Image: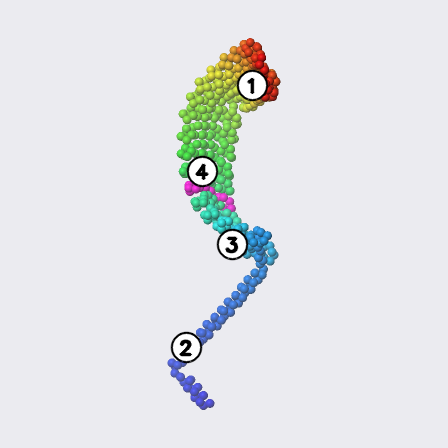
Amino acid sequence: MEIWAIQQSKYLSVGSSDNMFINRQHSEILKAISKFAYKLSTALTMSIRLALILLFISQLAFAQKEVKTFYDPMKRQIQEHYFVADDNQTMDGKYKRYFPNGKLNIEGTFVNGVRSGTFYEYHANGTLIRKISYENGLRHGAVEVYNEKGKQIQKAYYQNNLLVDSIKSYFPSGILKQESSFVKGKPDGFVKEYYASGKIRKEITYKNQKPNGVTKTFYESGTIETEANYKDGFISGYFKSFYPNAQLELIYSIAEGEKVGDFKNYDQEGHLLLEGHFMNAKLHGENIGYYTNGNKQHIYQFKEGGKTGTNFDYFENGKVKTKQQFAFNGLDSKLEEYTEDGLLVFTKEYRSNKSHGQWIFYFNDGKTVSLKESYEKGQLNGIRTQYHENGEKSVEETWKFNLITGPVKNYYQDGKLLSECEYRGSRQHGIYTSYYPNGKIKEQGEYVANKKHKQWKEFDETGKLIKTLTFQAGIFKGEKLN
């Protein structure tokens, strides 16, 4: 006991330097214990978290059902691979669809039955065709479309299933083909189209889903081709077209989708070719055409789309080419045509814009009649007579509504009968007789349905029978000489 007490007293009476050493060791021991306790606590926390995650995954795997469909009954060619919830209907999880050759067609993710995240669609050769993002089943974000060579051909942006910002299409070369601006899924602002060279092809301004404002088209050279003002999808105000050299070709006015007011048409050198007027989209008033030398080519009068009054066509030298006089109804008229020397070529009559009445044609002298024919409701009907230049009849035919029906007679220039035959339905049918200039019979026989039939007799100029030919329905059967 005394020894322990002495020893204890000895340790208690140690110097101050020894006490500092002991205290430092004690502090380091406490720090080590603290670090060990922290690591132990962290390890326990991670273990608990990992256990919870594994438990969740286990429950999730237990709740999902894997589904595979196949192209073939042997289940060798997979068609789809996806997961459904425990109701066996709601798609939930990864989704893949394959081509019959086994290559991936579509891949993405479903959450609670709707698309979520990015979906990828591929060409049969494996290259990406489309990439589109979804949020809560709605298209949301960028959409990119590619051709089979991997070149981007279209790009657009969606917000809650509505097109916003712009949509762009590209040529296979990668050059911009078309770009359109959208607001809340509707076209709004500029729509531009381009040539494969990159030059602008068309500019359209949209408002309220329809073209509104100036629309322009361009030649690939950059020269303007057409220009028009639109209102709610219809041309309103004016329309212009241009030649490749920028020369104005045509200009007219439009109101509420209908042509109105004056219009003019020019050639590529700027010569005025035509001018007129529209009323309610119909030609109305004076209509004048021009030759490039400035002389008038025609002067027409229109009333609500139909010709009226006296209308003229002119030769380039200013002489009248045709003259057409219309009745008040605008349907009945008489037409005269002249040569460049002013000689009459023909006169024609029309009723309800159809051939009607007598038509007369003239020889080059403009006076001697070469042909007279009669029409009824657009069809030949009545006697049709052709003339020799000496004024004598050449041919006389009987027509019934575009068919030769009745006698047809041919004449020598002195007016004597050359031949005669009956026709039915524009075919020779009946006795045919031809004559010598002295009036004697030259040949005689019978036609049946345009074919020689039975005996045909030939005579000399004195009237003596020379020979007899026999036919049956156009087929020669024999000959007998007299």
Q: Residues within 10 Å of mark 4 (few under 14, many from 20)?
A: many
Is residue 336 a member of the stretch shown in magenta? Answer: no
Residue at which label 3 appears: 117
Residue at which label 4 appears: 217
Task: Report how far apart the C-alphas of labels 3 and 4 lie in the structure.
Answer: 40 Å
Q: Secondary structure at mark 3?
A: strand
Image quadrant of residue 382? top right
| N-terminal-most mark, 2 or 4 | 2
Query: Is mark 1 in CB contact (under 8 Å) with mark 3?
Result: no
Find residue 24 and name its label.
2
Q: Which residues are magenta?
A: 183-199
Kind of residue sitting beneath label 1? Ser
Q: Residue at x 43, y 75 (%)?
A: 28
Rendered position, 217 above or below 362: below
Image quadrant of residue 193? top left
Residue at which label 1 appears: 374
